Image (tube, rainbow, N blue to C red):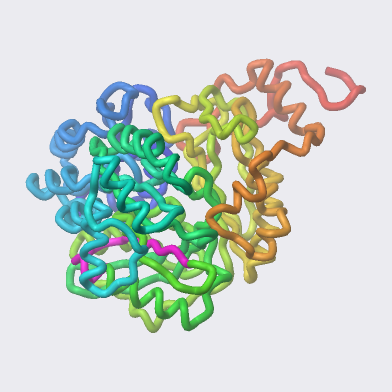
Amino acid sequence: MRKILVANRGEIALRVMKACREMGLPTVAVYSTADKGSLHVQFADEAVCIGPPQPLESYLNIEKIIETVRTTGADAVHPGYGFLAENSDFARRCSEEGITFIGPNHEAMRLLGNKVESRKMMVKAGIPVIPGMMAGCTDTASVLKEAESMGFPVLVKAAGGGGGKGMRIIRESRELEESLAACMREARSAFGDDTIYLEKYIERPRHVEFQILADLHGSVVHLFERECSIQRRYQKIVEETPSVALDDGLRQKMGSVAVQVAKTAGYTNAGTVEFLLDPSGKFYFLEVNARVQVEHPITEAVVGVDLVKQQIRIAAGEKLSLRQEDLKQRGHAIECRIYAEDPENDFLPGAGKILFVREPSGPGIRCDSGIWSGCEVSVHYDPILSKLVAWDETREQARRRMATALRQYVILGIKSTVGFLADIMNHEAFAQGKTHTGFIKEHFSDWRPSGAEPSELKIALIAAAALGATKSVARAGVPGREAFSPWKSTSGWRIGGSGRK
């Protein structure tokens, strides 16, 4: 590879570019007009504006991205996650144009992208799947008949995609018609396909996924599990590894099945095989995420493998240098996703100017971030701001380290989920490892902040921001920008009730 175009934005674009720089590979950033000053634009070796803020006219515009690859002389594309990362048409167009797509081949992506077809394939291969429909449907009467035969509760899912879109739990037949209509509308909007199907709903399961790497020469390994049971509206918000629910025997068995899934689908590059684990210890294949995951840093922390670099090497045709017997887990890692959302108001996404950011740091702390003091959070994109990772020798030490890091995380100017996540870390049930996919609903359905008074430092920072001290601020370490420090501000403000201005 000579040059890689990163077809994404925010923290994941920056993450990929850092890996490329360490490998000596130049990068091209693409950006919408809303992202002109973004960190990934500044970090890349080249940057090209590809359209207005609306994703369909910029980050989802396949032909514009292909054209940009040609005009910049790039010969490979890394899609990150989201946007076009699991779009088989985009992967196919790259292949047709002789562009290396850093991800799975488009045939495997297309097959695994349809949840019904992938279920059929796994059943044929003897992979355990959740009982459910083996064909998609849009007819309410047919779905009702299937639900009554299966027995309530059932879970309605979109056939054409995942990420929690088009999903509803239905516990009684009288809920079915309204829920199906809502699911189909959401599926049509998200994936352009309103086909849905039913699965038997498993009560209080854990969501456990296995990271896999597969090269172009037939080698496949797994890099152990991540537990992603802390979710709201089917979106993961806290992930950890190892899972407290797995012993060595179950871990080995699930890992072997994950490898079998990849081989069955002819899968290559990095991916994640997702399972549901019921309270009795039975596990069921859920789906394959054909991309690098948001939560990939915790695997990197405990296994010591850079997954993005592995993606690039595999796409370049290199053989895997990793052997399953050599891979080990060390310590424990937890990731918290920081969103621009209001936890007090049903997690409504927020937008606006971030007046000040102070990210936590220290031993065992990693923060993959796409924000800086003074940046604007757009209404047009997913509200994820950053990913905070804490690693330590034991789960309890990692939990405490994360709780401390969240207390140190300051984001002023917009609502964020930092305080909500801190309360999760400190909850007794989480500390005991008693997690399941209904954890948030069970323990945090009426969450409110503690109401503690802001620290003097926070008050000082708010005052500095309000007086215009953030006019030329940005995050430290980015060429051409100066890190903001309220202590260097010439504006008139003070801490406490005495002293000169």
- Residue 266 at x, y percent in the picture: 19, 66
Q: Nearer the viewer, residue 481 or 260?
A: 260
Q: Nearer the viewer, residue 491 or 335?
A: 335
Q: Dividing the image into 4 quarters, which one contains the N terminus? A: bottom left
Quarter of the C terminus within the rendering:
top right
Percent across and percent down for residue 364 are: 60, 60
Q: Is residue 266 magenta?
A: yes
Compared with residue 94, is residue 210 higher up or lower down, i.e. above or below? Answer: below
Q: Is residue 121 above or below residue 35?
A: below
Queried whether the magenta region covers residue 499, the answer comes back as: no
Highlighted range, magenta: 262-277
Which residue reaches farthest right?
498
Q: Can you see residue 80? A: no
Between 450 and 366, the one nearer to me in the picture:
450
Question: Where does the image place residue 9, in percent across and percent down from the top left?
Answer: 37, 37
Q: Is residue 456 visible?
A: yes
Q: Residue at x 32, y 59 (%)?
A: 132
Q: Residue 245 placed where, x, y %?
A: 55, 71
